[in-house]
Amino acid sequence: MGSEVISIRVRKGTAQRLRRLRINSSRKARSYLESLVWKEEAKQTIAELEAMVKKHSKPSKAGFTIASIREDRNEAH
């Protein structure tokens, strides 16, 4: 799998503190960014699906729910 480079600047001393704490900043940043992309793509997909449902669905007729529940209850007995 290929890769790309993203470069960031942090406040002075942060990189040194990360090294002292033995935190792999590259791995942490990569993991965070990949998770962020996944979440944002999921949000976008959900929004697209909601728009499709809204576009292709129509409201039920008045009283449909009550009639449907009664019909289900009558069939159960």
Image (tube, rainbow, N blue to C red):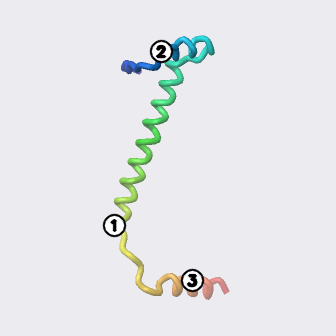
Q: Secondary structure at mark 2?
A: loop
User: Which numbered disc flags the more N-terminal residue, 3 or 2?
Assistant: 2
Which residue, given by chain and number where applicable, does mark 3 sit on?
Answer: 69
Q: Position of residue 2 (x, y in %)?
A: 38, 20
Which residue, given by chain and number where applicable, does mark 1 sit on?
Answer: 56
- Marks 1 and 2 in Cβ contact (< 8 Å): no
How far is mark 3 from mark 2, CA to CA? 66 Å
What amino acid is found at the position of numbered circle 3 in the picture? Ile
* Label 3 vs label 2, nearer the camera: 2
Mark 2 Cα-neighbour bin, 10 Å: few <14, some 14–19, many ≥20: few
How far is mark 1 from mark 2, CA to CA? 54 Å
Q: Is residue 24 left or right of residue 50?
A: right
Q: Secondary structure at mark 3?
A: helix
Residue 2's place in the image compared with 20, above or below, is below
- Marks 3 and 2 in Cβ contact (< 8 Å): no
Mark 3 Cα-neighbour bin, 10 Å: few <14, some 14–19, many ≥20: few
Q: Secondary structure at mark 1?
A: helix
* Label 1 vs label 2, nearer the camera: 2
What amino acid is found at the position of numbered circle 2 in the picture? Lys
Q: Looking at the rendering, in which quadrant would you find the N terminus? A: top left
Of 64 and 17, nearer the camera is: 17
Residue 2's place in the image compared with 54, above or below, is above
Which residue, given by chain and number where applicable, does mark 2 sit on?
Answer: 12
Residue at coordinates 52% horizontally, 17% vertically from top-left?
A: 14
Q: Position of residue 18 (x, y in %)?
A: 57, 16
Q: Looking at the rendering, in which quadrant would you find the C terminus? A: bottom right
Residue at coordinates 49% horizontally, 34% vertically from top-left?
A: 35
Residue at coordinates 38% horizontally, 47% vertically from top-left?
A: 44
Disc number for residue 45: none
What amino acid is found at the position of numbered circle 1 in the picture? His
User: Which numbered disc flags the more N-terminal residue, 1 or 2?
Assistant: 2
